[in-house]
Every structure is written in structure tokens, then in C-alpha cells.
Image (spheres, rainbow, N blue to C red):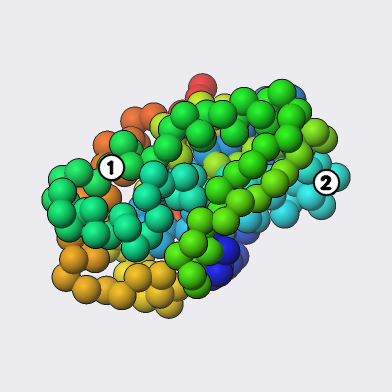
Amino acid sequence: MLGDILLVTEKHKKIAALIVDFSLKLKKKKLTIAIGGESGSGKSEVGHMIGKYFKVMGTLAKILHTDDYYLLPPKKRKIWRKKEGIDKIGVSEYDWPEINNTICKFRENKECIMPCIDLLTDQVDQLHTNFDGIEVLILEGLYSLKADADIRGFIDLTYHDTKEAQIIRGKEPQTGFRLEVLKREHEVVQSLKPLANIIITKEFDMINLMN
């Protein structure tokens, strides 16, 4: 997302390095890595550092922010949620056909137009990209574990654990409604944990479930 604030710390660097080292052992071309977890858990920071480490190695990686693929932009989504009810919040709010199309374009080395939310204006912009030569696609977002990815990492932190990070990043005011949204997102995100093949602990260590 344009205008997003990253709070990269040593723990994000540590887990990103572990994931990159692990991914190299897979020896897979056109590798997809999904990083999922709750709001403020560090998904964007971990995804950014994974991409950066690959770049240092001479491997081109691109980040796909799955939260850019909501069917409705932020302001309209908030109105829709208040009208339809908190229980409507979940994976169905994503444009999955478009996410899958982007992943296919990556695997086929084709050009693609990706949505990009500008957090300053709440507008949905477009990012024209070419996946030719891109070897790694990093998907990060609340529900990214639902995507077809080779590595699916779940950050095992709740929205209660990340209150400080949420306030600092300040994407949304911490109102009563926002807290209801976070509680509902917590339920949905935690339900996706069984899809993970890597668990990122609260200490940002890695538990490999692929063996």
C-alpha cells in the first residue's frame, strides 16, 4: 500500500533471513511466499526484508500486498461493514480471482496490472508491472495464507499483542468500531493458521511444519 509505514526491527530481519535460507533449500523456480497474520503483526516488515535479502543475493522479488485486493476501497468498505454487520468481515472481501490472476501472470512471466491502495487518498491506483525475470513473489496480508503459495508463513501474534504497532502506524483511528473489526479479523485470521507450513513465533523464530 502506498503511504504505509514500516517499523523494521532486528526480529523482522532475523525471521526474514531464516525464511530466505529455508526457501533456497526448496530449489524452486518462480517461488511464492505468503506471510499472513493479524493487523500490526509485522507482515509488511517481514515481506519487505525477505525481498531485500533476495535482492542482495541477486534474485529479483516482488511484493504483492493482498490487502490491496479488497473488493471495496477503505472508505466504502467501512460503510459496507457498518451496514452489513461485523460478521461479514472475512476472506470473501478479497477479489480472489484477481489475486489468482496476478499469481498466474507471475508464474507465466507476463505483464500485469495490480491494484495499489493509496492510504493518503483512499484511492485505488494501478501498478503496471512485468514479471519477466522476477523469481520470487511475496504475498503479505491478513488472509494471504488462502493464496496458492509454496511457503505459507503465519505470524503467531494477536491484535492484542500489537496494539503499540497499530497506534504508531496509525492506519485507522482506534475507535470502538475499529476494535470490533480487529476482533472479527482475529477470528478469521486465526482460522487460517492450519493452512500455514511455517509458524513465526512471538519471538520471531521459525517452526517448520513442512517436514
In what element is the residue under mark 1?
loop
| Label 1 Cα neighbours within 10 Å, binned few <14 / some 14-19 / many ≥20 | some
Residue 179 position within the rendered picture, expressed as x and y whole percent measured from the top left: 21, 65
Three-letter amino acid code of the residue under disc 1 = Gly
Position in image of residue 52 (x %, y %): 72, 54
Residue underneath mark 1: 90
**Vertical order, 181 against 5 (above or below):** above
Distance in Å between CA atoms under marks 1 and 2: 37 Å
On the image, the x and y values in percent for residue 138 come to 61, 42
Tell me the tag on residue 57.
Answer: 2
Q: Please name which of the two marks, 1 or 2, marks the residue nearer to the observer.
A: 1
- Left or right, 191 with reference to 162: left
Can the viewer see residue 205? Answer: no
Q: Residue at x 49, y 50 (%)?
A: 68
Q: Residues within 10 Å of mark 2 (few under 14, many from 20)?
A: few
Q: Nearer the viewer, residue 143 or 14?
A: 143
- Give the mark nearest the N terminus, 1 or 2: 2
Asked if residue 150 lies left or right of residue 72, the reply is: right
Q: Evaluate whether residue 69 shows in this view.
A: yes
Which of the 4 image quadrants contains residue 191? top left
Rendered residue at 55%/48% (across/down): 115
In the rendered image of this protein, does residue 192 appear above or below residue 108? below
Type of amino acid under label 2: Met
Q: Residue at x 53, y 64 (%)?
A: 118
Q: Secondary structure at mark 2?
A: loop
**Residue ID at (24%, 46%):** 89
